[in-house]
Image (cartoon, grey):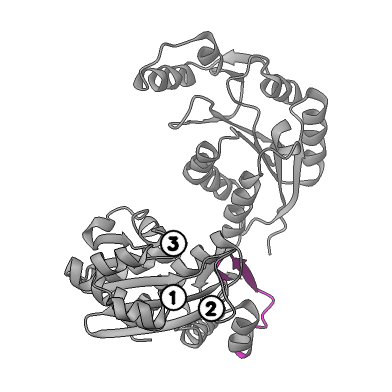
Amino acid sequence: MSGFKAEIISIGNEVLAGYTVNTNATFISQQLQGIGLPVYWVSTIRDEHEHILYALRTARERANVILVTGGLGPTPDDITKKTVAEFFDVPLEINRSVLKDVEKFVRDHGRELTEVNRNQALIPRCDDVIRNPMGTAPGLVFRREGRLFYFMPGVPREMKNMVRSFVLQDIRAHLALPQVTTHLFRTTGIPESYLYDRIKSHLPQDDHIDVSFLPREFGVDLRFRLISDDRKQQEAFNARLKDIREALRKYIFAEEEIELQEALGRILRNKGLTLAVAESFTGGLIGDWITDVPGSSDYFSGDLVTYSNESKIQLLNVRPETLQRYGAVSEQTVLEMVRGAQKRFCCDCAIATTGIAGPGGGSPQKPVGLCYIAARFKDKETVKEFRLGTVRRTNKKRGAVAGMEMLRRLLLDI
């Protein structure tokens, strides 16, 4: 582990008031961990002169890298910029390069340049300016007495672009950081405790390796981080990953930060397959998520939300006698739904869902949360009964995840 320490300062009254969640600090911390720079402190302060000065003075005494977000937007008082200029004892001046960027941004968006826009180019004299192609507020860089200061706007997409395009590379250029190797296993369909039991014998006991179990809404991320330049330790790290990959083969849907729908889409595209969906209790959520992925039209044919019995009969050719004998929420009905979707859209694959989303509508025989989900690939099919909870939106999400995961496993034969 390096001896360097980072601190993140978030400026924003709205964050302290609870109106905005501080996702900026989370993102920056994750990015710094990835280059071997640990974050020791995260501060959230008001956009007020004395608070900003105090935070900067405190950070200067204890951190090597200080990253500040917020307070650089088009506000009339410019408290943050004035305070930063005072802290570093530098003047505020119009930066011609920044002014050109601001003028271009405003012009490209079909607007007239205002005095507020022009004031964005009035910045403290700094060591570097971080250009902002996504907005009008530039980032500021100061290098003082071996310390690095980065000031960025609070708008998440603007800040993220600055971190990725400039800040990380600049930190690496000025600090001798250790080599960091990271790996992610993104899993679904297995609770954290069961996941741990399955891989505990493969977990490394090396001080150079960090292991994190990070629960998500419908899965667990397993993150590994090796901080070492040693070749043998790298080889041992890779061997551990191989063992864990095999132990969790059924549950790992990605080894990068993508969602299940994108992982499923890649399989469909790589195999040249097409997909249709028939949804009852999930109400079109599967189709919505699948079409969130750019290029999903390459493999996604369509989605029928067949909520009523009549729509199941008319659109999916579910037999009336099946509905009468077994009910809409049954294994028999969902199998006819998935076959009907595959046939109607002339697709290779299909997913179907039926269930009682809740919070009402259940019975002793078929309680709230009962659902049946089916997946089909050519003439192979699988169907499962699930007992979910009583929260409607959560049940819909869990059903959508289960349907996509069932098809993923069917396609991979796992």
Q: Where does residue 3 sit, x and y in percent of width and height? A: 72, 58
Mark 2 residue element: loop
Inspect the image, locate mark 2, and give the three-letter code of the amino acid beneath it: Lys
Mark 1 residue element: loop
Left or right of residue 397: residue 12: right
Q: Where does residue 17 sit, x and y in percent of width and height? A: 75, 36
Left or right of residue 21: residue 182: left
Outermost residue toward the left in this view: 346
The residue beneath circle 2 is: 366
Residue 254 seen in render: no
Badge 1 density bin: few <14, some 14–19, many ≥20, Cα 10 Å: many
The residue beneath circle 3 is: 258
Q: Where does residue 107 sit, x and y in percent of width and height? A: 37, 17
| Front position in the image: 105 or 230 | 105
Residues rendered magenta in the picture = 201-223
| Front position in the image: 246 or 5 | 246
Left or right of residue 131: residue 295: left
| Front position in the image: 13 or 79 | 13
| Front position in the image: 118 or 262 | 262
Of badges 1 and 3, nearer the viewer stands: 1
Q: Are marks 1 and 2 in contact (CB under 8 Å)?
A: yes
Residue at x-position 44% and y-position 66%: 400
Residue at x-position 40% and y-position 65%: 280
Q: How far separated are the C-alphas under marks 2 and 3?
A: 35 Å
The residue beneath circle 1 is: 329
Q: How far separated are the C-alphas under marks 1 and 2?
A: 8 Å
Check residue 212 for magenta coloring. Answer: yes
